[in-house]
Image (spheres, rainbow, N blue to C red):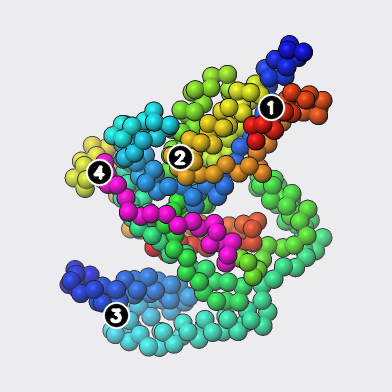
Amino acid sequence: MDDYFQMAIDSLVVIQLDFVNVYSSTDRQVQFDMLAGRASKSYDNGHVHMGDDIPCPSSLRHYWSYFEYMHGTASTLHFSDYQGQAHKIACSKGSQQGDAFETVRFTVTTFTSFGQVFACHVACTGAAICDDVFIVPPLAEGLALADELKQVLKQDLDLDLDVPKFNCFFPGDRINDDDHARALFQNAL
Amino acid sequence: MAGRFEHEKRACEVLRQLARTLPLLLLTQNKMEIHAACNKFLKGKSESFWNKCMAKGHARQHKLAANPLLASSRTSAQKDAMSPKQARGGNLSKANQTVCSVLKLAFGHDTLHNLQEKTPVGSVVFDKRFWPTTDALDEMRRHDEWFNIQENSFSIKKIGQYFRTCKSLSAQNADRWRGREHVG
């Protein structure tokens, strides 16, 4: 039985993670820290201290003024509803989804967090593209990574894991046949 | 003007509101009308421009009140035309949504609430201790031949051309609110 349980834990699964409303929810201070290349507070569960260097492509720093103008102050979203009535909504967090340049900055901001968490879980292979994260891990390792990623992204960037969009793909029909794998999965959630 | 009224709060507030509102009013007009409106505005004649904008706004409100943008079913012909186009464009999830969803994307009573939910409030009081100074930025740009890049890629002409021809910053979303732009 122990061998069977160990086999269930060791065999590879595919985990897909998604985060809620990422572009509009990211903490702007973190984005400026990343651009400046220095941490203004502690990040990565205390592994990065205030004043530590943060990796950032120097080419992106050329656009500091652009980002400062765009996000250094609250902007106003003008919305015209279905009856033509205008509404104003203050935008003071994150950036605008759909702007390709913002995608670059968002990706660079999250790169450090994703990279550091992945580095701690060497048994996991994964790819993070913007806010879409795919992991190919042994089940237990993958769930541990997902859990740490959830905590780190909440602490560092104020992003929430979209639990209903959390997908874990098992080879064959194992999740239905394997009580241990199912219990492990449910406990993790 | 902002420098001239630096210590007069009311004047600064008026200028701020003007800077926010004027581009919106101008963008309701076509290119020729914008030129004419700007010329008149600079001469202090803004009343006709204002009235024209208000008339357009009221006309739009009346039109929408008479025929509100609500959900409606897509026809099979529309689905047949849209979904292959979206799939060929690489947007498979949207193509799937077009085929499977019953309703067309439209505004609803809850759209404003949804939009507010998706626009969380954060702080814009930043810790600027490690932000680069203006001198540091200038120095960095000099080292990397930034001025050449600026001249070749970010000239006023090129920026103007970009904004005249660029697509809207956002597309329709599945949660039923339409494309919108940020105005700082």
State yes or no: discs 1 and 3 in contact (Cβ < 8 Å).
Answer: no
Quadrant including the N terminus of chain B:
bottom left
Q: Chain of mark 3?
A: B
User: Label 2 is found on which chain of the structure?
Assistant: A
User: Amino acid type of disc 3?
Assistant: Leu
In the picture of the structure, the residue carrying the numbered disc 1 is A184
Residue located 52% across and 81% down the image: B57
Mark 1 and mark 3, same subunit? Answer: no
Inspect the magenta stretch and tell me whether residue B107 lies in it. no
Residue at the disc numbered 2: A155
Q: Residues within 10 Å of mark 2 (few under 14, many from 20)?
A: some
Q: Quadrant of residue B50?
A: bottom left
A16 with respect to B24 (left or right): right
Residue ID for mark 4: B129
Q: Nearer the viewer, mark 2 or mark 3?
A: 2
Kindly identify which residue carries mark 3.
B42
Residue A99 visible in this rendered orientation of the protein: no
Residue in the foreground of this view, choosing between B128 and B72: B128
